[in-house]
Image (spheres, helix red, strand yellow):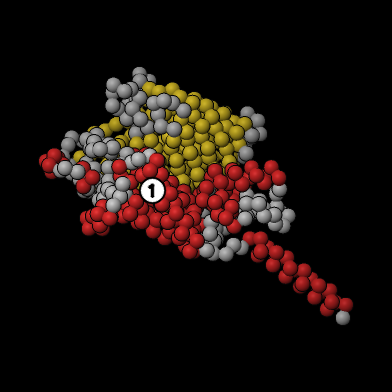
Amino acid sequence: MKRVLILCVVVLLTRMAVAQIVEDSVRPSRPWRAAAEVIGINAFVHCYDRFIAREDFAKTTLHSIRDNFKRGFVWDNDNFNTNMFAHPYHGNLYFSAARSNGMNFWQSYPYALGGSLMWEFFGENTPPSINDLFATSIGGAAIGETTYRISSIVLDDSKRGWQRVWREVLGGVVNPVRLINRLITGDAWRVRSTKHRYHDFDVIPLDFEISAGARYLAEKGSFEHGDFNPYVNLLFHYGDPLGEVNEPYDFFSAEATFGFSNRQPLVNAIHLVGQLWDTPILSNQKIQMNFGFYQHFNFYNSEAIRKEKDIIPYRIGETASVGAGFVYRIPQICRKVSLEQRLFLNGIILGGSLSDHYHVQERDYSLGSGFSAKLHTFMEFGRYGRLSLFADIYKLYTWKGYDEELVAKLDNLDYINAQGDAGSTTLIVLNPRLQLNITRHLLLDLYGSYFYRRSIYRDHDDVSMKTFELRAGLTYNL
């Protein structure tokens, strides 16, 4: 009888604990609220563009909406930053509206697609853009899931006072739509069980580092003309690529580089790779190997270094890209030396590269589709430091070129409907990086980049360009 009573008490306590965990961790799905928020995001941005910024493209009418449905999709002529970064970030807001209302990754994706379709047909009086649809939905999902996961790291409903405030504010900076939903539901100030967090550090490890220093960007592969400026680099590794992945983005790597110069863009580069699914192939004490599918987002941007010379060092976009990947790790090659390599082969649904001839409205680059291959190597040397080498190759095909005679006859260049210069472009990027330990958390950071572009044009002479970038600074590893 005593044993039965003890067993009943244990079962009761276990059920109470499980109920508390479910109460603390499970959030109800609110699909209609998410849809209303997507509409609200578009309405807010449209009203800002129309009534405050007074942008011409926002002056929509029933006539312009009817024309959008009648004429259909075209390739637009927005600038590189808008098409390759701003539109994916806008899509991240749609995605986050669903994600922060209880939907998972796959359930949230249609909201990014639906929000983009709504904006293209109703938000602007210019023709709906096919490249915006890909960039906003697919690229938006990559940024949206990344920002959702990062915001989960700092949120903790068991905290109070100023510690709770700064966590909510920081989470809101990373993912604004999630903060809005937490304010709506009251989660932003509701105190739950002790130890309640939105991220399990024991299951999914984290590695974050911030680097700062000086950067030199060469104009055309020499020290004769270049730009010196300070930079800040943020690198975030979430999860283990060889760990047990249950959901998309249980492993991802995110990197952003900011340059502080009046000649160069603030956002110099963004790199994301997120694991969608994987399975182990080989696992023993000497080697571990996994195969999986990954989503990629890459953005390299620069501006002309000299105003009198319209020479732009590089522009590369891989906005919508998915493919297969192999990851293997050798924990010990020799004493205190480990090796990890990641090999990716991706199909690029939408990418962009600098053009030597296509200069229409705000666009000086060609859009295209193709493939990319990446080999990322990491070596750890115990207490001495680490070495990494990224070797990426992109192949983009631009099949829908433009007719110069036809362009000259057009009254409205919005309807040129061209991807750029017909042809193909090969892009090669090499990024070696050496980090030497100074203290446990502080490292000397030496970084280089080599960029090579080979453009083969149907209607023009072929062009080859190369340049490089050097960085030196300090890294603080958290």
Q: Which quadrant, please, contains the C terminus?
A: top right
Neighbourhood count class around disc 1 (C-alpha, 10 Å): few under 14, some 14–19, many 20 upward: many
**Left or right: residue 4 compared with residue 245:** right
Q: Quadrant of residue 336?
A: top right
Instruction: Tell which of 440 and 51 is nearer to you.
Output: 51
Q: Which residue is mark 1?
A: 46
Q: Look at label 1 and name its amino acid.
A: His
Instruction: Tell which of 184 and 430 is nearer to you.
Output: 184
Q: Is residue 372 above or below residue 26?
A: above
Instruction: Tell which of 459 and 162 is nearer to you.
Output: 162
Q: Residue at x 59, y 31 (%)?
A: 443
Q: Residue furthest top?
A: 224
Number of callouts: 1
- Residue 256 image offset from top left, x and y in percent: 48, 39
Q: Residue furthest bottom?
A: 1
Q: Is residue 368 above or below residue 222?
A: below
**Left or right: residue 220 compared with residue 141:** left
- Residue 435 image offset from top left, x and y in percent: 55, 32
Q: Determine if residue 442 is in view.
A: yes
Q: Quadrant of residue 4?
A: bottom right
Instruction: Tell which of 80 and 191 is nearer to you.
Output: 191
Q: Residue furthest front?
A: 51
Q: Determine if residue 426 is in view.
A: no
Q: Residue at x 52, y 26 (%)?
A: 213
- Residue 26 image offset from top left, x and y in percent: 61, 63
Q: Which quadrant, please, contains the N terminus?
A: bottom right
Q: Residue at x 33, y 27 (%)?
A: 304
- Residue 166 image offset from top left, x and y in percent: 64, 42
**Circle 1 — which element?**
helix
Q: Residue at x 62, y 31 (%)?
A: 442
